Amino acid sequence: MGERELAVSDGLLGIGEDVQAERGQWIQICMREAAQRLHNDVTREVLKQIEDERHEQATLIARLREDLSRHSDFHAQLTALAGDLVAAQARLSEVSSVQAAVADLRVDVEAQKEQQQLQTSQLRALEDRIERGVPEQCQSREDPGTRDAPGPGCGLREMAASLE
């Protein structure tokens, strides 16, 4: 080959080297842009996933707060019910003690009633015996001075009349 051909071929080679260098730069730029887009896409997806998880956690926290509030309300209701139960038990205990006292009083009243009926019947029997036998005994005394004094055979009515 001649000089001229060499010069043309060197020139073409020089142009080819410039094109290749530009092409290499263009490829590097495209690769950087693709890497940047990929990085942006990955970052966007990670941020979206973080936001979704944050939203899910916020929802769970809200539910937890609501559950805690319900638990607190439930605890307050249980405390109130326990207080009501204690009060009701106290009233029942009081009612039971009152019922026991009433039962004791009823037994005492029945015993007193029976005692009173027995005493009334004994008093009536004594009055009947005295009314049947006393006037004769009081009049049959021989000493006229002791006739007005109550004696062992005189009735209650005669004794009361003699004291007047």
Image (spheres, helix red, strand yellow):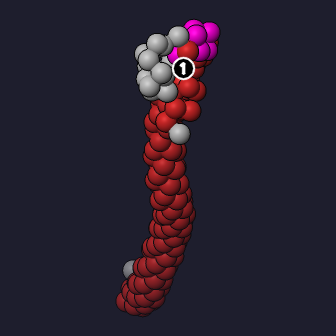
**Eyeballing the image, is 125 above or below 115?**
above
> Which residue bears the numbered disc 1?
155
Q: Quadrant of residue 11?
A: bottom left
Three-letter code for the amino acid on which mark 1 is drawn:
Gly
- Residue 114 visible in this rendered orientation of the protein: no
Q: Position of residue 15 (x, y in %)?
A: 45, 88
Q: Position of residue 159 (x, y in %)?
A: 51, 27
Task: Please tell me whether mark 1 sits on a helix, a strand or a loop.
Answer: loop
Which quadrant: the N terminus?
bottom left
Q: Main secondary structure of the magenta part?
A: helix
Q: Residue at x 48, y 13 (%)?
A: 141
Q: Nearer the viewer, residue 126 or 10?
A: 126
Q: Residue at x 46, y 78 (%)?
A: 36
Q: Position of residue 75 (x, y in %)?
A: 47, 54
In the shown orientation, is residue 29 left or right of residue 114?
left
Q: Nearer the viewer, residue 156 or 13?
A: 156
**Eyeballing the image, is 122 above or below 22?**
above
Q: Nearer the viewer, residue 143 or 34?
A: 143
**Span shown in magenta:** 130-138
Q: Position of residue 69 (x, y in %)?
A: 51, 62
